[in-house]
Amino acid sequence: MLRWRGLEATPAELGRTVVTVGMYDGVHRGHQHLIGTAVARARALGRPSLLLTFDPHPAEVVRPGSHPAILTSADRKAELVARLGVDAMCVLPFTPEFSRLSPEGFTHTVLVEHLHAAQVVVGRNFTYGHKATGTVESLAAEGRRFGFAVEGVDLTSVGQAPDLVGDGEVTISSTYIRACVAAGDMASAAMALGRPHRVDGVVVRGDRRGRELGYPTANVESPPYTAVPADGVYAGALVLRDHTTGASRSSHPAAISVGSNPTFAGSRRTVEAHLLDFSGDLYGEHVGVEFAVRLRGMAAFPGVPELLEAMARDVQDTRAALGL
């Protein structure tokens, strides 16, 4: 998959494209349906499919201080959309100047002049332009003027909502998944994502306390705004990633701790993964931590013996949860 940043870097040889536009944070099941539709339309037309996304999140530019938790890193997003068959991905810097672009200006400058859209596929609730005043209907009207087709795709729902949001149908959205992650409800998050939630980062040196206790951990430092699950102990996996591309290489089952190590009066919140049946030095590795199920909440223990008993149970419970 081709990947670039900024409209000016768009390859000239790309020709006319089928474009889908959005943040696509999480690349969840709703996104997958929408992207799949765009890819299918592109193949039917014999044109490349192009996903246009933004960085940073528009909310942070329009309302500073409101940056939402991010479900997928840029590299992870690229990996996931490539698997869906997308031919090209353009990351557009979302600046204050860009936020003031009118809907008509967005259509002409972005979709027509630089991306040469033959068709645009978006969700039914898509908005664009200054103060999000553009709609699917206005985009379709502009498409008739500039010579591209527009398709609005219905949103995807999950059948039964968890207690977190009440009963009934729930529309799959990044906001919904962030709420699931924040509550530690990894089963509901996975149902909406179509896979376990993952936190990407780099393994850094920590207190080395786990090694001293016989349970060495990979201390994963993630970028700002990463959607880290609620404090607790989880069964999951640690995925090794390519340093250059960020692509996933190998996966290893792990017992994962999220929190501030209350037994030792810690103050800094960390994500630490104890890999099962693994030996080796992971410092400096680019990794992803995947959360399958929450085993228990975070707790402060009276002393090291009680903590060790709990850690032994956590490893046993992780093996059981993962079917190992």
Image (tube, helix red, strand yellow):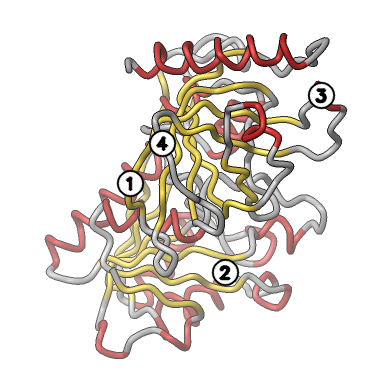
Residue designated by label 4: 278
Q: Residues within 10 Å of mark 2 (few under 14, many from 20)?
A: many
* Position of 166 relative to 39 (above/below): above
The front one of 129 and 49 is: 49
- In whole angstroms, how far apart are the C-alphas of marks 2 and 4? 53 Å
| Vertical arrangement, residue 140 with respect to residue 248, above or below | below
Report the residue marked by disc 3: 262
The residue carrying mark 1 is 250
Q: Earlier in the sequence, mark 2 or mark 1?
A: 2
Q: Label 3 is placed on what type of residue?
A: Pro
Q: Which residue is mark 2?
A: 103
Q: Position of residue 77 (x, y in %)?
A: 44, 55
Q: Closest to the observer: 89 or 107?
A: 89
State if disc 1 and disc 2 touch (CB < 8 Å): no
Residue type highlighted by circle 2:
Pro
Q: Residue at coordinates 43% horizontally, 34% vertically from top-left?
A: 237
Separation (CA) of disc 3 from disc 4: 26 Å
Can you tell which of label 1 and label 4 is closer to the viewer?
A: 4
Which one is earlier in the sequence, the residue at label 3 or at label 1?
1
Task: Point out the tag, 2 or 4, that comes first from the N-terminus.
Answer: 2
Q: Nearer the viewer, mark 3 or mark 4?
A: 4
SS category of the residue bearing label 2: helix
Taking 36 as reference, is 295 left or right?
A: right
Residue 185, given in percent of the width and then of the height, sits at 56, 20
Task: Please tell me whether mark 3 sits on a helix, a strand or a loop.
Answer: helix
Q: Are marks 2 and 4 in contact (CB under 8 Å)?
A: no
- Asked whether the residues under the numbered discs 1 and 4 touch, taking CB atoms below 8 Å apart as contact, a structural biologist would say no
Q: Name the residue: 41% across, 44% down.
A: 239
- Whether the residues at callouts 3 and 4 have beta carbons within 8 Å, the answer is no
Q: Earlier in the sequence, mark 3 or mark 4?
A: 3
